[in-house]
Amino acid sequence: MKLDRLVVNGAAPWWRQRPLIILGLLLLLLAWGAYELGQWRAGYNKLAALQLQGELGNLRDENRALGEQVTVLERTRLIDNESAEEVRTSLVELQAEILELREEIDFYRGIISPADRQAGLEVQSFKLSEGGEKGLYHYDLVMTQVLINQRQISGTVKVFVQGVQASEPVTLDFKKLSPNNSVTESFKFRYFQALAGDIRLPEGFVARAILVEVTSGGSSINKTFPWNIQG
């Protein structure tokens, strides 16, 4: 009968476990490296985020500043437009005043400059304007006397409107056309006189011209003006 051999093995020497130890150390190093890499990436991303936030803030500040500049420029443009409009309005008014003054200068020059015009009584101007109602008109008639002498002159003036009614030529007296008896036919002046009044044209009458007849002493003047309504 054989006896089985009992073999008792002791603990393995440390150098036999070295591969396991090295593997564990490598795993620890890898884990530590991964951790450090994650921390570095996190820090980098945080830094990048902070930089982006700073740039975004700068862009917002620039955008706000540009918006304020646009507002200022818009207000300046509106002010400039208003100022330009005021200047244009003032210029138009000034031109109208200059034109009126020139007309007045020409008017008085015509009175005091007999060398440029025929001496004596003259029908200076005749103007028509709308009277605010259909068929109603206002007129202004100016007569002058060139300063050949200093005496007063007197006489009568009649105004007629020539036109067509029912395809027939018709001449109407202003005196009969006045709705408020504003037509004056007598005058007396030394230098000039302005006569004004209102007339109403009959329905269907088409005006063509104005005839002014002035009589003073033994002489008379006839002058024709086109029917021209002024604003």
Image (cartoon, helix red, strand yellow):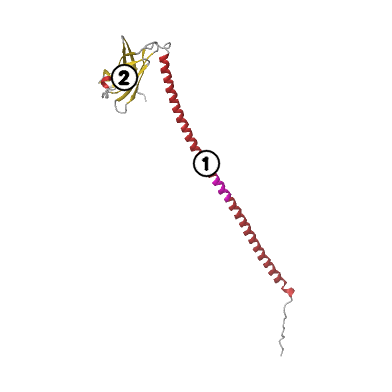
Determine whether 151 is above or below 100 in the image: above
Expressed as whole percent of the image width and height from the top left, the position of residue 17 reads 72, 73
- Which contiguous range is marked in magenta? 57-65
Tag in front: 2 or 1: 1
From the image, tell me which residue sits under label 1: 72
How far apart marks 2 and 1 lie (CA) works out to 59 Å
Judge by depth and name the residue closer to the eye, 124 or 50: 124
Residue 129 in the magenta stretch? The answer is no
Q: Amino acid at mark 2?
A: Arg
Q: Main secondary structure of the magenta part?
A: helix
Expressed as whole percent of the image width and height from the top left, the position of residue 115 reads 43, 10
How many circles with numbers are drawn on the protein?
2
- Asked if the residues shown at circle 2 and circle 1 are in contact, with their CB atoms under 8 angstroms apart, the answer is no
Q: Which mark is residue 123?
A: none
Element at label 1 = helix
Determine whether 139 is above or below 43 in the image: above
Q: Which mark is residue 208?
A: 2
Tell me the quadrant of the picture where the C terminus can be found. top left
Quarter of the image for residue 44 reads bottom right
Taking the spot 64% from the left edge, 61% from the top edge, the residue there is: 39
Tell me the quadrant of the picture where the N terminus can be found. bottom right
Q: Amino acid at mark 1?
A: Val
Q: Is residue 73 left or right of residue 198?
A: right
Taking the spot 62% from the left edge, 56% from the top edge, the residue there is: 47
Say few, some or many: other residues with alpha carbon within 10 Å of mark 2 (under 14 / 14 to 19 / 20 or more): some
